[in-house]
Every structure is written in C-alpha cells, then in structure tokens.
Image: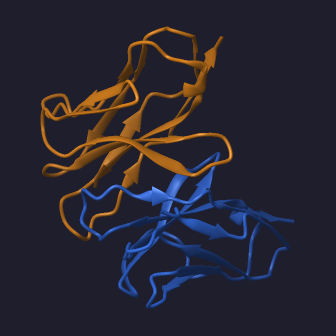
Amino acid sequence: GNSVTQMEGPVTLSEEAFLTINCTYTATGYPSLFWYVQYPGEGLQLLLKATKADDKGSNKGFEATYRKETTSFHLEKGSVQVSDSAVYFCALSGRSSASKIIFGSGTRLSIRP
Amino acid sequence: KAGVTQTPRYLIKTRGQQVTLSCSPISGHRSVSWYQQTPGQGLQFLFEYFSETQRNKGNFPGRFSGRQFSNSRSEMNVSTLELGDSALYLCASSWDSQPNQPQHFGDGTRLSIL
C-alpha cells in the first residue's frame, strides 16, 4: 500500500540556516504530494503541493520538488526564521476518488534566535 | 470565509463513557475527514464522508463511528471509551473528494480519558 517516510526529528537550527526535511514515498501510480505544517495548539495547514512529476510547490519561502525517479518530495527553505518553528508533515494522496491522504510521522522543527 | 470549526476544543471523559465531537466544514465543502493524532501513532485516518455517505474508512474498531448531515456538518462518536482513546481529534474538509484537493483542518478537539 501507499506510505510516506519522513526524516525523524526533532530538528534544531539557528535562524537564517538552510533547512531540508527529507520525505520519500511508496505508491502505485502517480500520487499527489503535500507538505502540511502544524503550529502549537492548532490544526494542520497546507503549506504546498505538487500533483505531477517535476512539479515544484512553493509557499512562504518553502519549496519541494516532486521527484519520481527518487520517489522523494524533500522540503527546503533557504533561510529559516523563529516563526517557522512547528511540526511539518509530508503526505500523499492516490489518484482514485477512493484514496485517502496518507501522512508521514511529522518532523518537529525548532529555530533558535 | 470561516474556517473549519470543531467543538468542543477540550473534553474530559472517563473510561466506559461515550462522546460525540462536532465539525462544521468550510462553507461549500462537501467532504469531511476525521483523524486521530497521538504522540505515539501520529496522524491516523478515521473516516471520510462525502454528501452524507461514508467514502473511506481507516483501521479503527467499530466503537468509532461518524455521520454527515445534509448541510455537510459532521459528527463522530466514540463509545465505551478507553484510556488509549486520549488524543487530539482533527477534522478536515475539502471541496470534494478528488485526490488532489488539499484538506483544510480545524484546530481539533483534545479528548482526555481518565
């Protein structure tokens, strides 16, 4: 079945550092891929998405490219801020209407001032 | 535009009781999904409703049930509560149930079982 594996946290970085959170997936066919972010005390918010190979999703300085050859969708940001501290979830959804979204285990990111 | 609203935000129950949680989706959204979030198991899919019909179901026991009303509002019910049911329960809505539709989440109901 479909699955998502993402890098375990917690990840702690200094402000303005470069961020990469790894995400790989297993799926039949061509799933849609997502990154969600969860701030303390809140639900998840969609950060970005990509629906086909080589698509690049981007939002708020974050980027991720759908790499079919490596079945990956790594999240990157060039210069993180304290306000980026949150838990990040990689997720996929299959192509059929019967598919449900599968979430990774989440990566907690903490940014030091 | 109002977001997804979940009520109540916090709930404390004891073992053996039952509980009903409510979710009001974004206006116009017809698909509602429920998730259980715990530190140990992460985010686990419970079920999805679309136009009052259950479209998908996760691997949870029959004690967990849900329904959706004609106005797309949804409720989930957990009967015979167990300590392990303590979790954050998240509701998410989307325009329809097509796979590339992003989900919009509420802030959740935190359920504590004593």
Q: Is residue A71 left or right of residue B105?
A: left
User: Residue B11, how many percent across, how many down?
Assistant: 79, 68
Residue, x 56% and y 60% (percent of image)? B106
Q: Residue furthest bottom?
A: B70
Among the chains, which one is orange? A
Vertical position of residue A38 compared to residue A77: above or below: below
Quarter of the image for the C terminus of chain B: give it.
Answer: bottom right
Q: For the point 62% across and 49% down, which residue is it?
A: A42
Which is more toward the observer, A92 or B2?
B2
- Tell me the blue chain: B
- Relative placement, left or right, of B81 versus A60 is right
Picture coordinates of residue B46, whole percent (x, y): 49, 68
Q: What residue is drawn where x is 52% and y is 71%? A: B60
User: In the rendering, at what x and y percent does residue B21 appear?
Assistant: 65, 76
- Answer with left or right where residue A93 lies relative to residue B94: left
Between residue B51 and residue A1, name the one nearer to us: B51
The answer to whether B40 appears left or right of A2 in the picture is right
